[in-house]
Amino acid sequence: MSGYFKRQIQLWGEQTQESLKEKSILILGCGGLGCSLAYALATSGIGRIYLVDFDTISLDNIHRQLAFEVQDEGKYKCEVLAQKMQKRTPQGVEISSFTCNFEEFCKKNLHVDLMLDASDNLHVRAQMDKHSKKTKTPWIYGSVEEYRGQVCFFDKADFSKTFKVQDIESKGQIAPMVMFMASFEANLALKYLTNQEVAKDKLFYLSFDGEFKTHSFYM
């Protein structure tokens, strides 16, 4: 399948592309961020991708969850996403869906090299960070709120000391902003999985309120 990955091989070579077959990732949440992450990563050649989400597709989600169609309403997000992504991937890429929460998934003791957050829940992110420290598995945090987004590759920094873990009210979102931040997460993921330099424990904040602004700082 070297033809399928031609442009990636031009970027990082045959050996690095081949190494992705041995990698495994978890995408936690199959909504807006999760759909875009799956589109960006499922076709990269990563050998095993685990999709975790216990929620079903609703009509008011579809505008920003680009893998779903109106006729998918009521179906489990992770199952539909896995089916559609598997059709786009080359032979040798395994995509599995789990209709459960993060805690239940962890009990399965499946190895992953990297966890990607698309959960839209601070409490779940705190759980991910705790599991990350316990298993020495890094994770990437991502969030979108109105015209703003945040991304961070968590390694040693403590999520609960950086953010106030609480229930928050959902705010409006547009598909381009969700896709933008998911692309940021996916780029960090591929840089890490291909053994390239990644800024760890550095929070990136992007805003399209008025003019485009970016801020970043180490935690």
Image (cartoon, rainbow, N blue to C red):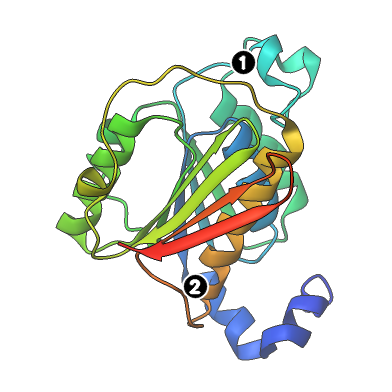
Label 2: few (<14), some or many (≥20) within 10 Å? Answer: many
Q: Earlier in the sequence, mark 1 or mark 2?
A: 1
Whether residue 82 is situated above or below residue 13 in the rendered picture: above
Name the amino acid type tagged 2. Leu
The residue furthest left is 134
Where's residue 21, x and y in %? Answer: 55, 71
The residue wearing badge 2 is 193
Quadrant that contains the C terminus: bottom left
Q: Quadrant of residue 28?
A: top left
Viewer-closest of 102 and 161: 161
Where's residue 72, x and y in %? Answer: 72, 17
Quadrant that contains the N terminus: bottom right
Identify which residue is drawn at 60% across, 89% down: 15
Identify which residue is drawn at 62% across, 63% down: 92
Q: Quadrant of residue 3?
A: bottom right
Tell whether 78 sits left or right of 203.
right
Where's residue 140, x and y in %? Answer: 43, 55
Whether residue 73 is situated above or below residue 159 in the rendered picture: above
The residue wearing badge 1 is 75
Q: Nearer the viewer, mark 1 or mark 2?
A: 2
Whether residue 214 is situated above or below residue 109 in the rendered picture: below
Name the amino acid type tagged 1. Lys
Where's residue 161, x and y in %? Answer: 20, 47
Label 1: few (<14), some or many (≥20) within 10 Å? Answer: some
Tell whether 59 sits left or right of 104.
right
